[in-house]
Image (cartoon, coloured by chain):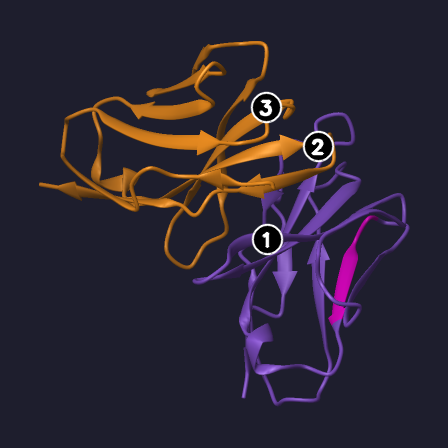
Chain colours: A purple, B orange
Amino acid sequence: KAGVTQTPRYLIKTRGQQVTLSCSPISGHRSVSWYQQTPGQGLQFLFEYFSETQRNKGNFPGRFSGRQFSNSRSEMNVSTLELGDSALYLCASSLSGRRYEQYFGPGTRLTVT
Amino acid sequence: GESVGLHLPTLSVQEGDNSIINCAYSNSASDYFIWYKQESGKGPQFIIDIRSNMDKRQGQRVTVLLNKTVKHLSLQIAATQPGDSAVYFCAEFQGAQKLVFGQGTRLTINP
């Protein structure tokens, strides 16, 4: 079974721009969560989607948003990029009954200049 | 507040020895505790989980111990191999909603 895939793997943007990242979960997994990983803050939860609905949200500003499609694929968007948004963005998928058992993709490395 | 911390940021062990990675947590209401392994350039890899009503669980070469009295979690890796070199994170599944991760411990294997 194929793992979680994320595109693109690397991205360079300038301040003020917006960016959209994509995630395809493991087949059969309907829950998709997003995390931000930085050296200073570690891994931080952004939000979770299930059945095209945001189920949970972390403590991030409204510039961070996401959505999920009917095939469980998910996207996250960051608007008005700031230098501090430079990070590894990770997507994880899980079965709806085992949401603690999350499987991560390789991440998208976003650099904001 | 919510926090999952680690006692040691780095750990070096000899190849073939057993490794023990420790973690302290603060939320006693968490349902599950999970260990992840992250190799350079990759996303975290699920290793093993333990439910809050258990105190020990074994997997292939790994054992997780949970001590709820002192809010302590540990991961034991038997016969450590070069491929075990990575950063290890503990995480707790809080409020049946989200994973909260610790800061990570870098495990280095000496030949």
Evaluate whether label 2 is on the same chain as label 1.
yes
The residue wearing badge 3 is B28
Question: On the rendered image, what quadrant is the C terminus of chain B found in?
Answer: top left
Give the camera-side residue of A109 and A5. A109
- Tag 1: Cα neighbours inside 10 Å, few (<14), some, or many (≥20)? many
Circle 2 SS class: loop
> Which region of the structure is painted magenta?
A72-77
The residue wearing badge 1 is A44
Q: Tell me, yes or no, whether the highlighted magenta stretch contains residue B92.
A: no
Please, what is the three-letter code of the amino acid marked with disc 3?
Ser
Disc 3 chain ID = B
The residue wearing badge 2 is A99
Question: Residue B33 bears which disc, if any?
Answer: none
Circle 1 SS class: strand
Please, what is the three-letter code of the amino acid marked with disc 2?
Arg
Circle 3 SS class: loop
Q: Earlier in the sequence, mark 2 or mark 1?
A: 1
Spot occupied by residue A4 in the image (x, y as percentages of width and height): 63, 49
Spot occupied by residue B23 in the image (x, y as percentages of width and height): 40, 32
- Tag 3: Cα neighbours inside 10 Å, few (<14), some, or many (≥20)? few
Q: Are marks 3 and 1 in contact (CB under 8 Å)?
A: no
